[in-house]
């Protein structure tokens, strides 16, 4: 699986909210866009999807904007990516057949491997919360090691 631009932008936007959470007041889309360098119109669409997934809340009007709907310790990268990109899978190959009853040579083995790759990616993204990523960005934790 390739994390889409949409998934990357969603993670960057919520990381920005996490890093600037010193006040509980909402952050405008313009401020998030300015801090992250993301295009504001696209960011607005992404934040609406994140709101629909229950990851952010919004306030309208003067002083309005977005805040995290839950503590950063409770929001994983997997939840964010899934909210904007759908389920975390390597591809749409289907499920492995039971007992090796494959229609084509090698199909079952590869289907099982692709399913495992998607599961490993999901587990890695579930293991990282916004709070974890914020600590790394602030220099309070070590950068992740390559797998």
Image: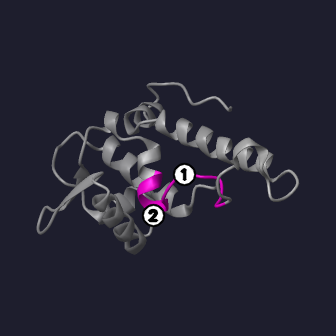
Whether residue 70 sits left or right of residue 138 in the image: it is left
Res. 132 visible in picture: yes
Q: Can you give x and y, in whole percent of width and height, for residue 137 in the image?
A: 46, 36
Reply above or below: 140 against 112. Answer: above
Position of the C terminus by quadrant: top right
Q: Nearer the viewer, mark 2 or mark 1?
A: 1
**In front here: 55 or 122?**
122
Whether residue 47 sits left or right of residue 114 in the image: it is left
Position of the N terminus by quadrant: bottom right
Residue lying furthest bottom: 41
Whether residue 11 sits left or right of residue 54 in the image: it is right
Q: Is residue 52 magenta?
A: no
Q: Which residue matches tag 1? A: 88
Are the residues at dot 2 and dot 1 in contact (C-beta closer than 8 Å)?
no
Q: Which residue matches tag 2? A: 38
Residue drawn 31% across the image and 66% down it: 48
Reply above or below: 80 against 99. Answer: below
Q: Which residues are magenta?
A: 81-92
Residue drawn 29% across the image and 44% down it: 20
Residue drawn 14% across the image and 67% down it: 60
Q: Can you give x and y, in whole percent of width and height, for residue 67 in the image?
A: 23, 51
Q: Secondary structure at mark 2?
A: loop
Q: How far apart are the two marked residues, 2 and 1, measured between alpha carbons?
A: 23 Å
Q: Can you give x and y, in whole percent of width and height, for residue 59 in the image?
A: 15, 61
Q: Quadrant of residue 39?
A: bottom left
* Label 2, residues with CA under 10 Å away: few <14, some 14-19, many ≥20: some
């Amino acid at each position: 699986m390739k994390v889409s631009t949409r998934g990357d932008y969603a993670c960057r936007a919520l990381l920005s909210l996490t890093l600037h959470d010193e006040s509980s007041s909402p952050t405008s889309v313009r401020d998030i866009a300015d801090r992250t360098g993301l295009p504001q119109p696209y960011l607005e669409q992404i934040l609406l999807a994140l709101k629909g997934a229950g990851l952010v809340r919004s306030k309208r009007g003067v002083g309005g904007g977005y805040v995290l709907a839950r503590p950063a310790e409770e929001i994983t990268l997997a939840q964010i990516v899934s909210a904007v990109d759908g389920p975390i899978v390597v591809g749409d190959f289907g499920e492995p057949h039971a007992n090796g009853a494959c229609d084509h040579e090698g199909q079952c083995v590869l289907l099982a491997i692709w399913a495992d790759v998607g599961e490993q990616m999901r587990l890695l993204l579930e293991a990282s919360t916004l709070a974890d990523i914020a600590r790394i960005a602030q220099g309070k934790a070590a950068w992740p090691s390559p797998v």
